[in-house]
Image (cartoon, rainbow, N blue to C red):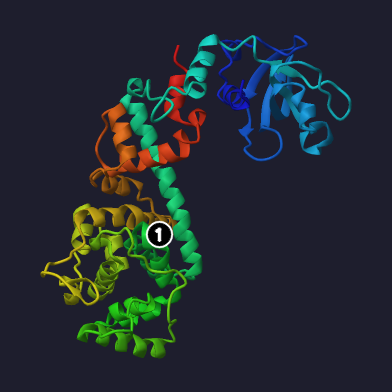
Amino acid sequence: MKEALLHYLWKFRKLGNAATSQSLLTTSNEIIEIINPGTHNQLSGPDFFNAQIRINNQLWAGNIEIHVRSSDWFLHNHEQDSAFNNVILHVVWEADCEVYDVSNQPIPTLELNKIIGKQILLNYQKLLETKNYKFINCEADFAEVSDLLVQNWLERIYFERLERKVLEVERLLMLQKGDWEAVLFAMLARNFGTVVNADAFEEIALVIPFKTIRKLAVANNQLEAVFLGICGLLKTSGELDAQTESWFNDFQFNKSKFDLKDSLHHTIQFFKLRPPNFPTIRLSQLAQLYEKHTTIFAQINAAKTRKELQSLFAIETSTYWQTHYNFNKTHKKRIKKLTPAFIDLLIINSIIPVKFAFAKAQGIIIEENLLELITSIPSEKNSIVSGFHNLKPLKHHALNTQAFIELKKNYCNLNRCLSCQIGNSILNRG
């Protein structure tokens, strides 16, 4: 028996038929009525705070402590901890000893092993103790869960994921002293860097004051030179072509003018990257974006649809990179634009979190607009998304795929089935 299951049974009053008929009894045969199970405490101290129960018609308000065995009270040294002085009920699977409060009075005890139905125990065992699965614990039953329940749960955990990204926005807002445009630039820079160079690209946003970015963006092709230079990509060794030498000189000038750093703490990486994701290409596209749109924060906030945002980010590299992926190595001319799929990732990981955080800060409710936006973005393709679609056909859009990632990483992989609405549905089958 796991204590987590006992927490679940108490929290949601899954105590057979007894919870609704006033027939719960303490080990001393006193009648228990649950009025309020209390607030679940995930930290130290009693498991549930501020519960309300009646014992033999006497109303009690206080805390609930839950253990597999009564003797765990002493195993955990609760008798020596004043945090447990206000425990009004000890809920256990097996009552193997008496437990007393600070005044040496027995604490009322509810023993569960005789009142919990066998089916919920069998469902729990199948869900969490049987390891006959390849992808997730509930894969054998996932398809049978109602579409409405699954979709509502996916929407909820999508917003869980979004709220966590908002925390990152708020962290940057503190670092940038309340400058929302600087925060947007940092978020976009990080995602332009992709996974490999995310930290390095974010560092660019943190070491170059955004007021300097604004000035460079309107200074005739200076921003790209500074990006390339501060990343250590403008090498002085060997023969430089005319454009690289021009960028190098521009960087030296701007470094002196704006008192910029010589280099970043993080090293720019090319290894294992496909050429379209080379940092040279992404830095150029980022620079071109800010040179083309000097009021991009306002434009993004005004944009409501994927089509508007795709149009806003229809950006290509500067001319030099039409024939290069790296310095001094040419290829046949080709235009290197941000692809629709890459722009969609920027919308998911940068734009929506910033829009949501900004709206919250202004006291504006935009959840419905964000739902329309995220569900208009096509589904991503990865092994997690494929795994869920193989279990149950669901709508192919970015809200679901983002929710699938959240569900798999922060619920399924951690065996948090009791905190999952899908797991709850399976657990409570008759």
Horizontal side of 307 relative to 129 (left or right) equals: left
Q: Is residue 50 above or below residue 308?
A: above
Residue 407 image point, x, y percent: 41, 37
Residue at the extreme front of the image, as rendered: 238
Reply above or below: 29 against 269.
Answer: above
The residue sitting at 84% across, 24% down in the picture is 100
Please identify the residue farthest to the right as the structure is shown.
Answer: 103
- Asked whether, in this view, residue 209 is left or right of residue 401, the answer is right
In the image, residue 156 lies at what x, y percent? 40, 38
Q: Is residue 420 visible?
A: yes
Q: Quadrant of the C terminus?
A: top left
| Front-most of residues 407 and 283 | 283
Mark 1 crowd level (few <14, some 14–19, many ≥20, 10 Å Cα): some
Is 309 on the left or on the right of 165, as rendered? left
- Amino acid type at image mark 1: Phe
The image position of residue 317, as x and y in percent, is 20, 70
Q: Residue at x 79, y 32 (%)?
A: 78
Q: Is mark 1 on a helix, strand or loop?
A: helix
Question: Which x, y percent locates residue 142?
Answer: 36, 24
Residue 87, image quadrant: top right
- Viewer-nearest residue: 36 or 151: 151
| Residue plotted at (28% across, 70% down) | 280
Q: Residue at x 63, y 26 (%)?
A: 3
Q: Nearer the viewer, residue 354 or 366?
A: 354
Q: Name the residue under label 1.
A: 358
Task: Look at the image and tell me in which quarter the N terminus lies.
Answer: top right
Q: Is residue 219 visible?
A: no
